[in-house]
Image (tube, helix red, strand yellow):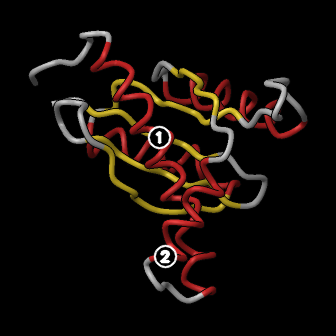
Amino acid sequence: MTRYLGVDYGTKRVGLAISDGVGLTARPLEVVPRNIVVERVRELDEEYTIKMVIVGLPTGLSGEEGVSAVGARALGKELLAATGIPVDYLDERFTSKLAEDVLLQSGMKRRQRRETVDKVAAAIILQDYLDVRAADGNHETG
């Protein structure tokens, strides 16, 4: 069984999400400080055998990449170089806002939302990627 890892890039915190073993569903995993994300991804690869890392690419309303996208791409390159796991990118406009809205509607307190939103955003990014793969007929059976 191999899995996909979703990454919601942030300069201080990085949200992580993991797929199920067949690459159909995503679930929030954890939020880690930016300075240890590469080490944590190595550990997760040992535990889950990660097939691909999907990094959310923050873009503006026009679709243009800004400073955050440069940071997300740099993280992707760093992860690839350090782990050898292939990296793909997915436009993640509005995922953090969507994650925040979902958590707000669930009644979660502000502090809990702050600690959770990044991993939920990573799960949204990863689920979007998995849904596109499934629609294209690219999912595996194990």
- Horizontal relation, residue 81 to residue 122: left or right: right
Q: Is residue 73 above or below residue 7?
A: above
The structure residue drawn at horizontal position 75% and vertical position 30%, both measured from the top left corner, is 74
User: Which one is nearer the viewer's eye here, 79 or 101?
Assistant: 101
Label 1 Cα crowd, 10 Å radius (few <14 / some 14-19 / many 20+): many
Q: Secondary structure at mark 1?
A: strand
Q: Residues within 10 Å of mark 2 (few under 14, many from 20)?
A: few
Q: Which one is in front, 139 or 35? A: 139
Q: In 3D space, how far apart are the residues under numbered discs 2 and 1 (Cα atoms)?
A: 23 Å
Task: Report the side of 45 relative to 99 (left or right).
Answer: left
Residue type at the position of mark 2: Gln
Locate the N terminus by quadrant. Answer: top left
Quadrant occupied by the C terminus: top left
- Quarter of the figure with residue 91: top right
Residue occupied by mark 1: 6
Residue 95 disc label: none
Q: Position of residue 34 (x, y in %)?
A: 69, 54
Q: Position of residue 69 (x, y in %)?
A: 79, 33
Answer above or below: position of 122 versus 135: below
Q: What label sits on residue 105 in the rendered view?
A: 2
Pointer 2 or 1: first along the chain? 1
Three-letter code for the amino acid on which mark 1 is drawn: Gly
The mark closer to the camera, 2 or 1, is 2
Q: Residue at x 30, y 17 (%)?
A: 135
Q: Residue at x 34, y 24 (%)?
A: 51
Q: Residue at 70%, 54% (x, y): give it.
A: 35
